[in-house]
Image (cartoon, rainbow, N blue to C red):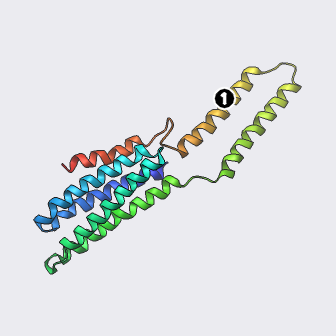
Amino acid sequence: MDTRRQLIVQEVNAIGTAYLRLDLLPKNAQTPLREDFRKYVSSRAALFPKISDASAAFDELNKTLELQKQIWTQAVNASSGPEYQSARMLLLPALNDMIDIVTTRSVAIQTHPPLPIFLMLAMIALACTGVTGYRASITEKSPHFYSMAFAAVIVFTFYLILDIEYPRFGLIRLDHANHLLIELVETMK
């Protein structure tokens, strides 16, 4: 989860850096690029609330990729003159970083521990519950409170592990970090 949060910050920083470097381009090229940047950041911010709907998320990601192509083409064309060689050397790597982080974040969103890990967690929970049940059966007094408390702790721990692994759906969320993209759009106006 922390890695995903850091990737959001890296993306915001990469976009912000590339946006600032647009100042190096000719004035007539800056306005359309700035508008495309606003659309791009809005698209990135709109993607993550749509994650639970695969087709909507896929459509938004395609919109993002199209905007990336537009921004790249416009930046290359605007910096093609020899007087803009230094602008090209500063702007294009920043744009490349901005584009690359999309792939990095997409992979991070789709990467989870393998199913055997979750099965092992479930087996450990069942084994602990079985041992607790067996222990309760051989004692004269039935410790119902402790058995229930133990079961609650196991269930809550298992839930938290899943909640941290899927931070878009539960109590632990990345909404605040994603809000950085919305704040970035606001600074671009």
Residue 47 in the figure: left or right of residue 79: right
Quickly name the residue at label 1.
152
Mark 1 crowd level (few <14, some 14–19, many ≥20, 10 Å Cα): few
Relative image position of residue 188 (x, y in whole percent): 21, 51
Amino acid at pointer 1: Ala
Q: What residue appears at the point 86 percent right and 26 percent down from the top-left corner?
A: 137
Residue 189 in the figure: left or right of residue 110: left
Relative image position of residue 144 (x, y in whole percent): 76, 21
Relative image position of residue 184 (x, y in whole percent): 27, 49
Kindly state the secondary structure of the residue where label 1 is placed.
helix
Relative image position of residue 17 (x, y in whole percent): 26, 60
Q: Where, by quadrant of the figure, is residue 37 drawn? A: bottom left
Q: Where, by quadrant of the figure, is residue 114 drawn? A: bottom right
Q: What residue appears at the point 38 percent right and 41 percent down from the top-left corner?
A: 176
- In the image, residue 147 sits, relative to residue 184, either above or below, namely above
Q: What residue appears at the point 72 percent right and 38 percent down from the top-left corner?
A: 125
Residue 129 in the figure: left or right of residue 157: right
- Name the outermost residue toward the top: 141
- In the image, residue 48 sits, relative to residue 129, either above or below, namely below
Q: What residue appears at the point 42 percent right and 48 percent down from the top-left corner?
A: 56
